[in-house]
């Protein structure tokens, strides 16, 4: 009975897992906030990684990572808070 319970709990926990990039929504300051930028990246090959740092609406430094898609659009794949080590 214990093994069945463990398997059931593990299956339930894993059912909520995803690739992680699907749930990242652009925030004010993101390159893709309000839609894709009007100008497409013409010199960056698909698969290129594009970092972007800005201050979010709450005043924190944020770093986002984008990947250039085959159609030259940007896909937001990561966001993290930047910690200032000078403080």
Image (cartoon, rainbow, N blue to C red):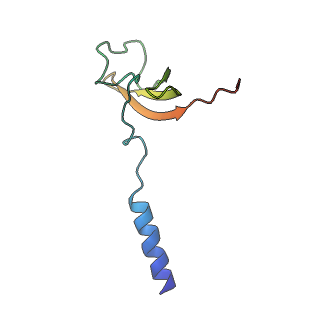
Q: Residue at x 41, y 22 (%)?
A: 29
Q: Residue at x 37, y 15 (%)?
A: 41
The image position of residue 15, as x and y in percent, is: 38, 61
Work out whether 49 lies above or below 13: above
| Residue in the foreground of this view, choosing between 68 and 84 | 84
Q: Is residue 14 visible?
A: yes
Query: In this figure, what is the number of numbered marks?
Result: 0
Of all residues, the one furthest to the bottom in this rendering is: 1
Work out whether 39 lies above or below 86: above
The image position of residue 64, as x and y in percent, is: 48, 28
Of all residues, the one furthest to the front in this rendering is: 58
| Residue in the foreground of this view, choosing between 80 and 40 | 80
Of all residues, the one furthest to the right in this rendering is: 86
Q: Is residue 52 visible?
A: no
The image position of residue 30, as x and y in percent, is: 40, 24
Q: Residue at x 36, y 35 (%)?
A: 25
Work out whether 17 lies above or below 59: below
Quadrant housing residue 83: top right
Q: Residue at x 46, y 24 (%)?
A: 48
Work out whether 77 lies above or below 87: below
Judge left or right: residue 79 versus residue 35.
right
Q: Quadrant of the C terminus?
A: top right
The image position of residue 36, as x and y in percent, is: 30, 22
């Amino acid at each position: 009975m214990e093994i069945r319970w463990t398997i059931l709990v593990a299956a339930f926990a894993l059912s909520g897992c995803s690739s992680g990039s699907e749930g990242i929504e652009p925030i004010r300051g993101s390159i893709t906030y309000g839609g894709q930028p009007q100008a497409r990246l013409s010199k960056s090959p698909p698969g290129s990684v594009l970092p972007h740092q800005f201050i979010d609406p709450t005043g924190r430094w944020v770093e986002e990572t984008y990947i250039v898609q085959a159609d030259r659009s940007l896909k937001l794949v990561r966001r993290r808070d930047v910690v200032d080590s000078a403080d």
